[in-house]
Image (cartoon, rainbow, N blue to C red):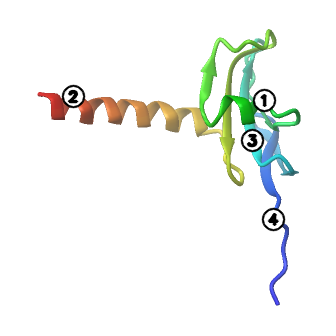
């Protein structure tokens, strides 16, 4: 018999000092506070369920410059924002190749 927890996990803490925590909502967040140090956490109040799996620059939260939400186990790694940027760049290049 195989047993295990079905709860997702998220990274929590600040860059360079994160731990893995259980996340009942299943939504992980990565934010860049106005202080500049990236913060990682489980979405405690359901913001990501409304926002969806994306990044929002100039967040409506006065304490954060940007906020990213993701739905998956340990998805809020330090490379999340970089991955989104590269995905956008590659998508743009491929689109331009097909339009040319």
Q: Nearer the viewer, mark 1 or mark 3?
A: 1
Q: Residue at x 21, y 28 (%)?
A: 96
Which residue, given by chain and number where applicable, does mark 4 sit on?
6
Determine if residue 19 is in view. Answer: yes
Q: Nearer the viewer, mark 1 or mark 2?
A: 1
As helix, strand or loop, the secondary structure at mark 3 comes to strand
Other residues around mark 4 within 10 Å, as few (<14) / some (14–19) / many (≥20): few
Which element is circle 1 on?
A: helix
What kind of element bears circle 4? Answer: loop
Question: Are discs 1 and 3 less than 8 Å apart at CB?
Answer: no
| Front position in the image: 46 or 36 | 46
Q: Disc 2 marks which residue?
A: 96
Q: Quadrant of the N terminus?
A: bottom right
Rendering quarter of residue 79: top right
Q: Please state, as top left, top right, bottom left or bottom right, where the C terminus lies in the image.
A: top left
How far is mark 1 from mark 4, CA to CA? 21 Å
Residue 22 vertical placement versus 54 (above, below): below
Tell me the residue that label 1 is attached to: 47
Q: Earlier in the sequence, mark 1 or mark 4?
A: 4
User: Judging from the image, what secondary structure is the residue with disc 2 in?
Assistant: helix
**Which mark is first along the chain, 2 or 1?**
1
């Amino acid at each position: 018999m195989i047993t295990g927890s079905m709860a997702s996990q998220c990274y929590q803490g600040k860059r360079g000092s994160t731990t893995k925590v259980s996340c009942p909502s299943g939504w992980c967040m990565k934010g860049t506070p106005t202080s500049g140090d990236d913060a990682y956490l489980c979405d405690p109040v359901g913001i990501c369920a409304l926002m969806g799996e994306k990044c929002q620059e100039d967040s409506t939260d006065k304490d954060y410059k940007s906020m990213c939400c993701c739905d998956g186990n340990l998805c809020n790694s330090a490379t999340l924002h970089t991955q989104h940027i590269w995905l956008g760049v590659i998508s743009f290049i491929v689109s331009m190749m097909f339009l040319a």
